[in-house]
Amino acid sequence: DSGVTQTPKHLITATGQRVTLRCSPRSGDLSVYWYQQSLDQGLQFLIQYYNGEERAKGNILERFSAQQFPDLHSELNLSSLELGDSALYFCASSAGLQGTLGKNIQYFGAGTRLSVL
Amino acid sequence: GDSVTQMEGPVTLSEEAFLTINCTYTATGYPSLFWYVQYPGEGLQLLLKATKADDKGSNKGFEATYRKETTSFHLEKGSVQVSDSAVYFCALADGYQKVTFGTGTKLQVIP
């Protein structure tokens, strides 16, 4: 058990809908990362938050957004869903001190499997 | 930008065979290097790491050495088991938390 909790485990929805994925990081971790894993594009970094602030952005679509709350949990919002958004979405957390080498270990949750029909 | 290149899979081996999964990287500065493993139906788990040149990471019989001169971090195991069947991801992290993953290499071990 990595200590990172993601809910729900599975989500089935229709095109055009909006969903919210939730992530609780490991106790004490300040950084949260979101990834999308699909068969055709592999594991892609979406976005990172550190202590409530956006820190880095990857290949995140404009239809997607995220936030990190004061209790450090994070939500990934996906809107106007398309068939191609079907994927596994992972959250990871780390202790996250900027510029501190060797502390960049990310611990992953089990993922949320999103199916858009 | 940073990048990680892994050998394409799937890799199919018989039990007790020797495993090598190649990984090379491109990065500015001095990244930390990692191998993650993803078992079927699960999230990624950190397998091993190395934070500076010539460091050797090891765990569960797997090893990888950080080679700065060849920008490589190849994963090896002397004798694989069926339970090692999984997808293995090489990754690097810069000093600012950004992690770049390789595309993953699927390993299948047959009895």
Image (cartoon, grey):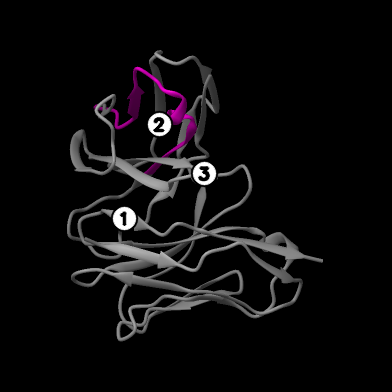
Q: Are marks 1 and 3 in contact (CB under 8 Å)?
A: no
Q: Are marks 3 and 2 in contact (CB under 8 Å)?
A: no
Alpha carbon separation for disc pair 1 and 3: 20 Å
Q: Which mark is residue A109?
A: none
The total number of labels drawn is 3
Q: Position of residue A21 (x, y in %)?
A: 41, 25
Q: Which mark is residue A39?
A: 3
Which residue type does callout 3 highlight?
Answer: Leu
Q: Residue at x 30, y 50 (%)?
A: A95
Relative vertical location of residue B61 with respect to residue B101 in this rendering, above or below: below
Q: Position of residue B98 (x, y in %)?
A: 26, 53
Image quadrant assignment for residue B10: bottom right
Q: Does residue A32 appear in the picture of this structure?
A: no
Between label 3 and label 2, give the one nearer the viewer: 3
Between label 1 and label 3, give the one nearer the viewer: 3
Are there few (<14), some (14-19), or many (20+) residues within 10 Å of tag 3?
Answer: few
Are there few (<14), some (14-19), or many (20+) residues within 10 Å of tag 1?
Answer: many
Magenta range is A70-92
Residue identified by numbered label 1:
B99
Residue identified by numbered label 2:
A23
Q: Chain of mark 1?
A: B
Relative vertical location of residue A32 with respect to residue A70 in this rendering, above or below: below
Q: Regarding mark 2 in the picture, which secondary structure is present there?
A: strand
Image-based side of A31 in relation to A55, left or right: right
Relative vertical location of residue B51 with respect to residue A86 in this rendering, above or below: below
For the residue pair A23 and B107, the one nearer the viewer reads as: B107
Q: Residue at x 71, y 78 (%)?
A: B17
Relative vertical location of residue A26 with respect to residue A104 in this rendering, above or below: above
Alpha carbon separation for disc pair 1 and 2: 19 Å
